[in-house]
């Protein structure tokens, strides 16, 4: 057992300025990131697993209405919530994910339950909800719990084609525990105004989420279709495993891969077995943070 433990989180990446967000909301984002980081770090510090840590961090972000996952998630074109989430254990290469599920308070916990108590990797829609009910996970009867006035306003603007920046944020975490195990977790409310049944990159293993103890753990955010087509999370893994690139360089190259054919932004966090991290983004901001061992936590939004 070692004290070389690390957790890295993201709360999405956007093309917004300080003026767009404002100081009050920025303070809320920083507080939310700090709380999520602490939730995961406490587990690692007490000898818990990387899987437990990334789930705890993502649950915290799902419960915070500022972030596009769980409470505060984006609305589909029909004004509904459909959540995607995934988690992967780098030690066992087991993974669980959920797509297009409604009413489940914490989709990331459902994804972990699928990983640990099901023979499947991905369960979607009503089947995912039924699995959550069978496993006695917390469901929310009133969908107003998930809905915020901001997301309703964004949907109306999107319907009128007045929305400059469509909500597409994702939250995620990667971690290295004291036993040298890696894990990754990702959760999202999807795109504002997305078609009913649309599934993004977050629940697709190798696209938005991936972990392997030998190489890296990755969680992505950005344009889901772009991330899927470029298979970003696995691209980081492949560049590290087969070209021997360090995690930061692999993350940069993966982000830029096929940009001549596949447009729109791709952003990610990653970690390697030595605890080296990557925070790679091409938007104006990325809600992000990390904490290594007993060092002070790092929280940032802007490039500077």
Image (spheres, grey):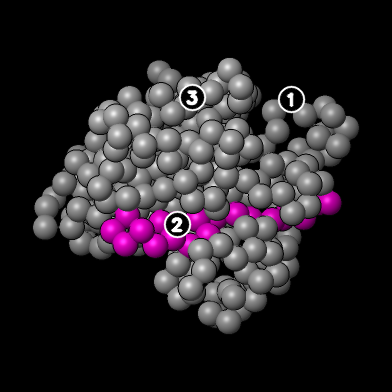
Question: Are circles 3 and 2 on residues that touch, CB within 8 Å?
Answer: no
- Residue 16's place in the image compared with 241, above or below, is above
Q: Which residue is mark 3?
A: 257
How many marks are shown on the rendered structure?
3
Task: Determine which of the numbered discs, if any, sits on residue 164 in the image.
Answer: 1
Q: Give the residue at x 44% y 40%.
A: 233
Tell me the distance, in whole angstroms, between the alpha carbons under discs 3 and 2.
Answer: 24 Å
Q: Mark 3 vs mark 1: which is more N-terminal?
A: 1
Mark 3 nearby-residue class (10 Å; few <14, some 14–19, many ≥20): some
Tell me the distance, in whole angstroms, between the alpha carbons under discs 3 and 1.
Answer: 26 Å
Near-viewer residue (68 or 100): 100
Query: Residue 211's spot in the image, x, y percent?
Result: 36, 50
Quarter in which the N terminus is drawn: bottom left
Please say whether residue 82 is one of the residues in the magenta stretch: yes
Residue 177 occupies which quadrant of the picture?
Answer: bottom left
Q: Is residue 168 left or right of residue 271?
A: right
The answer to whether residue 109 is seen in the rendering is: no
The furthest residue to the front: 242
Q: Give the residue at x 49% y 51%.
A: 205
Quarter in which the C terminus is drawn: top left
Q: Give the residue at x 58% y 49%.
A: 188
Query: Residue 238's spot in the image, x, y percent?
Result: 36, 37
- Residue 273's place in the image compared with 122, above or below, is above
Residue interval drawn in magenta? 78-97
Near-viewer residue (202 or 42): 202
Q: Secondary structure at mark 1?
A: loop
Q: Mark 3 vs mark 2: which is more N-terminal?
A: 2
Q: Which residue is mark 2?
A: 87
Mark 1 nearby-residue class (10 Å; few <14, some 14–19, many ≥20): few
Near-viewer residue (115 or 238): 238
Task: Determine which of the numbered discs, if any, sits on residue 118 in the image.
Answer: none
Q: Give the residue at x 45% y 57%.
A: 87
């Amino acid at each position: 057992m070692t004290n070389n433990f690390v957790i890295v989180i993201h709360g999405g990446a956007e093309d917004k300025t300080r003026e767009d967000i404002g100081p009050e909301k920025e303070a809320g984002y920083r507080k939310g990131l700090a709380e999520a980081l602490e939730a995961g770090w406490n587990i690692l510090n007490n000898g818990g697993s990387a899987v437990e840590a990334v789930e705890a961090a993502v649950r915290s972000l799902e419960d915070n209405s500022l972030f596009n996952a769980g409470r505060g998630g984006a609305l589909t074109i029909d004004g509904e919530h459909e959540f995607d989430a995934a988690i992967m254990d780098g030690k066992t290469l087991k993974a669980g994910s959920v797509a297009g599920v409604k009413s489940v308070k914490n989709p990331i916990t459902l994804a972990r339950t699928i990983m640990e108590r099901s023979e499947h990797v991905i369960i979607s829609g009503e089947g995912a909800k039924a699995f959550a009910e069978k496993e006695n996970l917390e469901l929310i009867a009133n969908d107003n719990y998930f809905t915020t006035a901001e997301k309703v306003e964004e949907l109306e603007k999107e319907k009128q084609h007045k929305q400059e920046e469509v909500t597409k944020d994702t939250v995620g975490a990667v971690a290295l525990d004291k036993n040298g195990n890696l894990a990754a977790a990702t959760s999202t409310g999807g795109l504002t105004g997305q078609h009913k049944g649309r599934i993004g990159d977050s629940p697709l293993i190798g696209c938005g989420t991936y972990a392997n103890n030998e190489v890296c753990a990755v969680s992505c955010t950005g344009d889901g279709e772009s991330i899927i087509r470029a298979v970003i999370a696995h691209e980081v893994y492949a560049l590290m495993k087969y070209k021997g690139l360090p995690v930061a360089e692999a993350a940069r190259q993966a982000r830029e891969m096929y940009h001549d054919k596949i447009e729109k932004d791709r952003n990610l966090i990653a970690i390697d077995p030595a605890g080296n991290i990557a925070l790679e983004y091409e938007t104006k901001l990325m809600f992000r943070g990390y904490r290594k061992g007993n060092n002070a936590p790092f929280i940032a939004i802007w490039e500077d």
